[in-house]
Image (cartoon, rainbow, N blue to C red):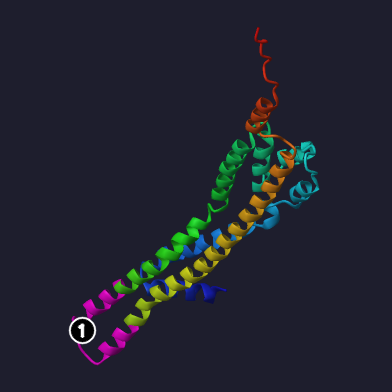
Amino acid sequence: MTEIFQTMVSFMNKGGPFMWPLLLCSIVTVATIVLASLTLRERKVLPLVIESEIERLMPGGSAERLMRIVNDDSSSLAGVVRTALQHLRWPRSENIESVQTRARRELVRLERGLIVLEVVTGIAPLIGLIGTVSGLVHVFSGLGLSTGASDTKAVALGISEALNCTIFGLSIAVPALIAFSYFSKKVEVMSVEMESLVSDLIAKCYYGRVPSGEASSSSRATAPAPARAPVG
């Protein structure tokens, strides 16, 4: 274990000072991937009990049991469903707008950690490239100060050590890019599933209701015409 640690420290020191920011990027990447794996579990975002209750709800039926369930739940689906149920007295169009606003907020919350992976994917290769260029500048600046047959060997060794930064930067960026693509697609799939469930819920809750605009026009159409006075 000690030998592995010493090898890693030697690798970092040979790569130059830019290896340490890359090490920080690698630690942040691993931590973000672990947190995203825990946060974006499907059953934590879309609890099965809420899905089952929405599917069980009959069109025009009471949603009191569903309301009790979502009040005790902190998932994204529960938040969106709770918004829909709290505004059932509103017109359907206004309720849909409030649900869409809450859904956008939940989507931002789910994607909150993914921006870190996106940033690391962009900056890790650049930091590695800067470290490599810096190392090459150092190697070639010292080349003119020394003479002898050992120059070629020293230059080759210096270049190989400078390239450690590029290798380290790319080895961080590739897993970060894979994780970012995977979690982004997962959030997209879950958001579509959430939208489908909430749309089904709203359709069931507003089943049989007559929109206020249609009701008023219907009442005007069926109202009896005022009686005319007979012409004498």
Q: Is residue 148 above or below residue 200?
A: below
- Residue nearest the observer in this picture, 225 or 182: 225
- Residue nearest the observer in this picture, 40 or 222: 222
Give residue 190's quadrant in the image: bottom right
Q: Is residue 204 left or right of residue 96?
A: right
- Quadrant (top left/top right/bottom left/bottom right) for the C terminus: top right
Residue 72 in percent (x, y) is at 73, 40
Query: Can the viewer see residue 24?
Result: no
Query: Can the viewer see residue 215?
Result: yes
Give residue 206's quadrant in the image: top right
- Callout 1: 10 Å neighbours few (<14), some, many (20+)? few
**Which residue range is magenta in the image?**
134-157
**Which residue: 78% across, 46% down?**
53
**Which residue: 70% across, 44% down?**
203
**Which residue: 57% across, 74% down?**
1
Residue designated by label 1: 146
Type of residue at label 1? Ser
Residue 55 in percent (x, y) is at 77, 49
Q: Is residue 107 above or below residue 20?
A: above
Residue 220 in percent (x, y) is at 65, 25
Disc 1, SS: loop
Q: Is residue 92 left or right of residue 174?
A: right
Q: Is residue 52 magenta?
A: no
